[in-house]
Amino acid sequence: MKKLGVNDQNLMKWIGKGVIGLAAATALSFSSYSPAFAHSLTVAFPVSHTPEVNTVQRTLIEAWSLIRETFVDPTFNHQDWDLKLQQTMVEMFPLRSEDAAYSKVRGMLSTLGDPYTRIISPKEYQSFRIGSDGNLQGVGLFVSVQPNTGHLVVLSCVENSPAARAGIHEGDELLEINGERLDGVDSETAAQKLRGRAGTTVTVKVHRGNGAGVSSYQEVKLPREVIKLSPVSSAIIPHKMPDGRFLKTGYVKLSSFSQSAAMEMENTIQDMENQGVQSYILDLRNNPGGLVTAGLDVAQIWLDGDETLVNTVDRDGNMAPISMVNGHAVTHDPLVVLVNEGSASASEILAGALHDNGRAILVGHKTFGKGKIQSVTQLHDGSALFVTVAKYLSPALHDIDQVGITPDVQCTVEMLNSAKDTFKERKTSSSSLEADSCIMVAEHELDIQESKGSAS
């Protein structure tokens, strides 16, 4: 598989800080020194005599130091970050349990005003790594916190997973897990509660609204299973042109950016090329993101030359491009990319790279709007710290954070109804893909490109 070539050190800088890699940080003593600061900083605080709490105190210092050096907001949400450490240490001193101490750490991080800067336990981190590798034991739900409401919503369900078989749908709000309310619970904590040993069960309560003021509640017991997270699924759609010719359109759905995503996609595209596919639909709908490097590697499958894939902006406002080096696309056939409100993070980086470089037309709905890059650093006790270290702009310098990407062509309610009518009129064994109005719109856009003789 091709790996991303970068002619500057910007991406390597972020990876070195743990942006995408899973590098372990050196355990800090209770005195901190960093090359980023030309002095040693000694912090005075009461040391807990409870071993479990004392361990979390050390973890807190690691987290505080990493945030102090790399957090994207140098004002730390307009507060004295050094003073905040001392205050939290004092509050932690009388505690007697690890859970209570970790709660104080999470409380300190919450004052930064950034939901993506967070700490997860060693057990949660192992689950995170397993998910990135492509396998986990759970119910097959992808969930995310809506920034504007704080609600946990379902981004997507793994096909044929326990959650999908139970009728849970994207957009459903997750209210309870095993009777425990999820108010204020972040997505990774909720995901951890859903995971567990195959053969066990978990009970979830969801709320569903139809947008017309009608809502319903559903409580269901789900069995946990081994979930194989193959990030790529595909199909070849025979496509009839207005002039009567039949062409083959390759449909490729990318559900997440795991370690194997780029390799599996490249193999899929190469196989479709061998079968005579002449145009492509890349479906990034409800893809919540994942490894940023995987998104950049996928972009290289479709692009040539030295194109800029994304621009990063650090805490000091310095912007630097991440560009390919002498790239060679696997295919130059026409391409349409499908996106929606569930397309986030690495999905938005990829969609922006393909769109702004003139390689693809975007069809669907406005994307989620997560335009920030997080570091992931393993701490001395096995926990992991996620820190927002930069924001990113698309190649055309569009700010995505909390704004999203607006597609060139939107799939409207009228189109959805039209698609259903068209499907009924066919009265054939057409696949669900052919009944998807956004795919129909994508095919129409490919028709236009073909009629113009324009291969991006």
Image (cartoon, rainbow, N blue to C red):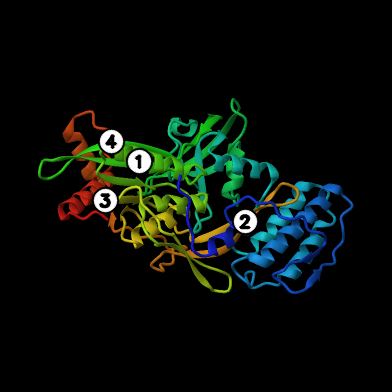
Circle 3 residue: 334
Q: Nearer the viewer, residue 119 or 256?
A: 256
**Label 1, label 2: how far apart the Cα atoms are:** 32 Å
Q: Marks 2 and 3: CB-CB under 8 Å?
A: no
Q: Identify the residue under disc 1.
A: 270
Which of the two marks, 1 or 2, is nearer to us in this view? 1
Q: What is the residue that sits farthest to the front in this orientation? A: 326
Please rate how many residues cluster around mark 2, counting C-alpha atoms within 10 Å: few if below 14, some from 14 to 19, many from 20.
Answer: many
Residue bearing mark 2: 18
Q: Disc 1 residue type?
A: Gln
Classify 9 as above or below 332: below
List the single residue furthest toward the right.
49
Q: Which mark is residue 454?
A: none
**Disc 4: which residue:** 275
- Earlier-in-chain disc, 3 versus 4: 4
Q: Position of residue 368 (x, y in %)?
A: 44, 56
Q: Residue at 50% across / 71% down in the picture? A: 319
